[in-house]
Image: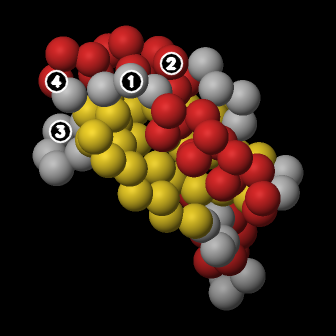
Amino acid sequence: MVAAVVLIRARRDVIPTAAKQVAGIEGVAEVYSVSGEWDLIAVVRVPEWEQIAEVVTERIAQIEGLDRTETLVAFRVYSRKDMDAAYEMFD
């Protein structure tokens, strides 16, 4: 599984609608409405690297009212479960 985080800037009047559209795209696991420089954050999880480009450039970027995206591809995933297991080996 390959993961990416997509930061999305959208026009203020389309944020709720755009969030629902992004959430409906296959490969998008979650969408968060956030404060700050970006308006939405989409978490993409797909089986192969090439699918990230498809989800971001062919689907997310085509949604009306989005001004900009920035994609951060994850190299490794760390979770609380993984971190707890790593520390347990030192006990």
Q: Is residue 23 left or right of residue 1?
A: left
Residue 12 location, x and y as percent? Answer: 16, 24
> Mark 4 belongs to which amino acid?
Arg
| Nearest to N terminus: mark 1 or mark 3 | 3
Checking the image for residue 21, the label placed there is 2
Residue 16 visible in rendering: yes
> Mark 2 belongs to which amino acid?
Gln
> Mark 1 belongs to which amino acid?
Glu
Q: Is residue 40 left or right of residue 87?
A: left
Q: Is residue 67 above or below residue 2?
A: above
Q: Residues within 10 Å of mark 1 (few under 14, many from 20)?
A: few
Whether the residues at callouts 3 and 2 have beta carbons within 8 Å, the answer is no
| Nearest to N terminus: mark 2 or mark 4 | 4
Checking the image for residue 12, the label placed there is 4
Task: State the separation of the CA atoms marked 3 and 2.
Answer: 19 Å
Look at 72% across and 29% down and name the residue there: 26
Q: Mark 1 sits on what residue?
A: 64
Q: Mark 3 sits on what residue?
A: 35
Q: Residues within 10 Å of mark 2 (few under 14, many from 20)?
A: some
Q: Is residue 82 above or below residue 88?
A: above
Task: State the separation of the CA atoms marked 3 and 4.
Answer: 12 Å
